[in-house]
């Protein structure tokens, strides 16, 4: 088994700079968050062959907010939020960037070396999910797991510092053995995920509070749709709620003021993301329009008051309006038809008169 040369001077200096961060006691003035906060670092590496380095991309998300990213394995860190770079000096971000670049080079080399000794076929994709969570009582935990083509590869137990291979996977065993032999990198990775990551969360929560605490009010509309096949029943009532943030929301249908309990007639789209970091949701209810019930969609969200938002639908509401509009359109059409018929009859009478006058 070939051991990778790990103590290249450049590599050592960058990690050394990282370890010299005042991170083990991150800004004593920064309190733990009011709610659990999770920072996820997602790395995707596409390996094409042994000659090229992997196509690598990395993204960091605090909860559902993208904070920073790397477009390639040697690219600079790009910030998605103006506040994401605060809390560390440009020099500290630079050192962190270097450390990450070197770590990615190390992974790439390890994987390529391992693959050369196995029957693995190119291309394949390695994904790494790592990060940490900080709880309101100040406790934190960190995680690191990886997959190859969506199958579990290796996991890093941050409590014990042990690498764990997915059972029965030859490549996983070899990668695991290679990482395990490199105690230096393992302990730096532990520092990165247990200290630097936690410090980043505290900084983000402090400097980004306006983004993280923002409240966007939902907009709700109610409309009806006939199911494509059924000729008579049921009609589908749809309540579409969009543009809200944060995520937690409760949307229910009320029949005659009573909440409709979950059942076969009730369906939800689930929470879907919008492009502007808000969310949307649709709740569909199958109803019998002839039964004379009244319906309303009830939305409860932190941006709304205690009552929430109620959008009504019912026999006294849109159906009556729809009927009135329908009747008005029919009357108008009848009037236009009558006018056209009258004009045609009189035109023929006029031409008969003109003919009989010999014009
Ligand atoms: C912090 O909270 C978590 C979850 O609520 C709990 O499991 C843990 O024991 C707590 N830690 C301390 C030190 O209180
Ligand atoms: C609920 O929605 C799913 C997905 O849109 C659909 O497949 C299913 O038929 C729906 N069920 C009902 C009762 O409308």
Image (cartoon, helix red, strand yellow):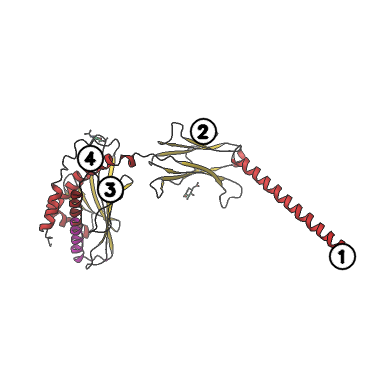
298 on left or right of 177: right
Distance (Cα) linking label 2 and label 1: 74 Å
Q: Secondary structure at mark 1?
A: helix
Q: Which residue is mark 3?
A: 40
Q: Secondary structure at mark 4?
A: strand
Task: Identify the magenta region.
Answer: 102-122
Mark in the foreground, 3 or 2: 3
Is 54 magenta? The answer is: no
Q: Which residue is mark 4?
A: 140
Is 116 magenta? The answer is: yes
Q: Which residue is mark 2?
A: 258
Residue at mark 1: C-beta within 8 A of ligand 2? no
294 on left or right of 184: right
Q: Residue at x 24, y 51 (%)?
A: 145
Q: Quadrant of ligand 1?
A: top left
Q: Secondary structure at mark 2?
A: strand
Q: Residues within 10 Å of mark 1 (few under 14, many from 20)?
A: few
> Are the residues flagged by discs 2 and 1 in contact, CB closer than 8 Å?
no
Look at the image and tell me in which quarter the N terminus lies: bottom left
How many numbered badges does the structure rendering display?
Answer: 4
Distance (Cα) linking label 4 and label 2: 43 Å
Distance (Cα) linking label 3 and label 2: 41 Å
Q: Secondary structure at mark 3?
A: strand
Toward the bottom, the furthest residue is 51
């Amino acid at each position: 088994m070939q051991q990778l040369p790990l103590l290249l001077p450049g590599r050592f200096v960058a990690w050394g700079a990282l370890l010299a961060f005042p991170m083990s006691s991150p800004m004593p003035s920064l309190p733990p968050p009011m709610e659990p906060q999770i920072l996820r670092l997602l790395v995707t590496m596409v390996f094409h062959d042994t000659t090229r380095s992997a196509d690598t991309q990395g993204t960091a998300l605090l909860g559902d907010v993208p904070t920073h990213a790397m477009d390639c394995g040697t690219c600079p860190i790009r910030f998605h939020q103006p506040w994401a770079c605060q809390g560390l000096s440009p020099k500290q971000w630079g050192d962190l960037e270097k450390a990450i670049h070197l770590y990615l080079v190390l992974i790439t080399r390890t994987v390529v070396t391992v693959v050369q000794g196995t029957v693995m076929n190119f291309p394949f994709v390695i994904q790494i999910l790592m990060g940490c969570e900080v709880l309101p009582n100040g406790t934190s935990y960190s995680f690191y797991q990886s997959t190859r083509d969506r199958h579990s590869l290796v996991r890093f137990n941050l409590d014990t510092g042990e690498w764990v291979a997915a059972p029965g996977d030859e490549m996983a065993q070899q990668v695991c053995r290679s990482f395990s032999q490199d105690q230096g990198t393992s302990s730096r990775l532990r520092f990165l995920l247990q200290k630097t990551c936690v410090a980043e969360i505290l900084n983000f929560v402090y400097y980004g509070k306006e983004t993280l605490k923002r409240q966007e009010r939902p907009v709700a509309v109610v409309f009806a749709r006939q199911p494509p096949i059924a000729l008579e029943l049921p009609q589908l009532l749809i309540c579409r709620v969009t543009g809200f943030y944060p995520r937690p929301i409760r949307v229910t249908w009320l029949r005659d003021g009573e909440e409709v309990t979950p059942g076969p007639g009730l369906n939800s789209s689930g929470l879907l993301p919008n492009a502007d970091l808000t969310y949307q949701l649709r709740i569909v209810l199958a109803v019998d329009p002839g039964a004379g019930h009244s319906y309303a969609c009830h939305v409860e969200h932190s941006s709304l008051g205690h009552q929430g938002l109620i959008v009504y639908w019912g026999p006294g509401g849109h159906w009556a309006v729809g009927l009135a509009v329908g009747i008005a359109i029919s009357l108008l059409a009848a009037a236009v038809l009558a006018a056209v018929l009258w004009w045609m009859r009189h035109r023929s009478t006029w031409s008969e008169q003109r003919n009989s006058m010999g014009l």
